[in-house]
Every structure is written in C-alpha cells, then in structure tokens.
Amino acid sequence: MKKALIVAGGWKGHEPDEVAAIFKEGLEKRGFEVEVSNTLDAYRDLERLKSLNLTVPEWTMGTIEKEQLVPLLQAVEGGTGIAGVHGGMADSFRDAPPYQFMVGGQWVAHPGGAGVTYEVNIKDHEHPITKGLKDFTVTSEQYYMHVDPAIHVLATTNFGDVVMPVAWTKTYGKGRVFYCSVGHNAEATAKPEALELIMRGMVWAASD
C-alpha cells in the first residue's frame, strides 16, 4: 500500500483542514494509507519522509525552519513525490527560495480576487494526468505566477494575451512534482473537474 503524508496549516482563509480532508478521502479511495499532520515538524524526520510515496503540502504562507525544510527537500530529491494546489503549495514560505525552486512556481497576484470566472485549458492531452480531460470553467482566484521555465505545462489559463500555467509537472532530483493553481478553498477543490485533475496529479507524483 502506498503511503502519503498531508501537512495542513498556515493561513486559514484557504481552509487547509477542510482541503486536507478532501485529499485524504480521495487518496484513500485510490488505495493510499494517509496521515494528516498539522505541524511542519512532520518534515523533520528524513527517514520517515523517505519511506513515503507522496507528501502533500497544504500550508499557505508562514515560515519554515531549516531543520524542517532540508529533510523535505532531501526526501523529494531522493524520490518521494510531492503534489499540491493553490497557495497551499505555491504560496508557502515566501522567504524560502529553495522550496519555491522545488515547486516550480510562486504566486504573484490574483487580480479580481475570489470571484473571477475563468477557463482552465488542457494543453497536454497525452499525459497520463490529463488524458481524456476537457477544458473547464471555475469561479475562484485566478493565479498569476512566477514559473520555472523547466516545468512541463499540463493546463493553462489566460490573462488577456498572457497564457499562464495552471497545472504542471517537473522533477526535483528523483522526485516527481505536481502542482495545480486551482484549489482556493474546499468548494473550489471539490469541483469535480478540478478534483479529478488534482487527484490524478497526486497519483502520478507518487509513482515510481
């Protein structure tokens, strides 16, 4: 049985506990044994992290200590997958560039706030995460982001003439990384089209 660790906390506006519960249920349905932690100290035990197939950060903003960050980076570099959404993964630890480098992007702005209706366009129709999925519309925060040019873009959205990645994969050492900018709160995360994309990404990240 594959093992996953969800670490939930930080800014409460993103409903980290509620989103973590959605992820836990989704992963368990897919055969994972899932632990949920509400402390960044869960990242301190390198050997524990290395024993996992997947870690899911759901922690917006805040700060992370070196003794928490380094084992997480080492575990992913060694082959533990990491996958997450929205600010819970890409607006964490603004003072930790090594973490942002691992993720492959960082939130910059969400013009219009949480009431923007926008389209998510699938760009890679052959990847196992997105194969068979169709474009969908969501009303939520639309993330404008700094992104690593090394990411593999799965889905995008448009800000006028600017095409912005929404979902991507990358590798960090031997570890697989998946990110999706949809997932502002529990309601946005649970939208069926978004949740299917997210859960497929988590399963992919946990694969060998």
Image (spheres, grey):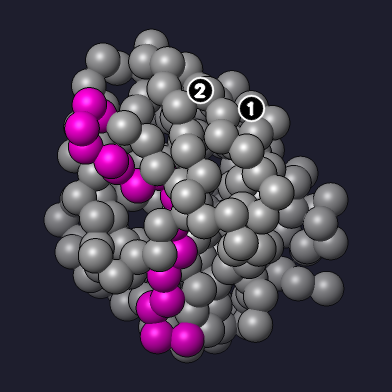
As drawn, is 64 to the left or to the right of 75?
A: left
Does the residue at mark 2 contact the one at mark 1 (Cβ under 8 Å)?
A: yes
Can residue 100 be seen at all in this image of the molecule?
Answer: no
Quick one: quadrant of the C terminus? Answer: bottom right
Does residue 31 lie above or below 73 as drawn?
Answer: above
Considering only order in the chain, which callout, 1 or 2, is on the residue closer to the N terminus? 2
Badge 2: residue crowd in 10 Å (few <14, some 14–19, many ≥20): some
Does residue 124 lie above or below 53 as drawn?
Answer: above
Q: Nearer the viewer, mark 2 or mark 1?
A: 2
Locate residue 112, reporting x and y percent. 26, 15
As drawn, is 156 to the left or to the right of 91?
A: right
Numbered circle sitting on residue 90: none
Quick one: quadrant of the N terminus? Answer: bottom right
As drawn, is 1 to the left or to the right of 84?
A: right
Q: Which residues make up the magenta segment?
A: 159-174
Residue at 58% in and 68% down: 205
Camera-nearest residue between 82 and 195: 195
Locate residue 89, reporting x and y percent. 40, 50
Locate residue 147, reporting x and y percent. 24, 55
What residue type is disc 1 on?
Answer: Lys
Numbered circle sitting on residue 191: 1
Q: What residue would you read off at disc 2? A: 138
Camera-nearest residue between 133 and 59: 133
What residue type is disc 2 on?
Answer: Val
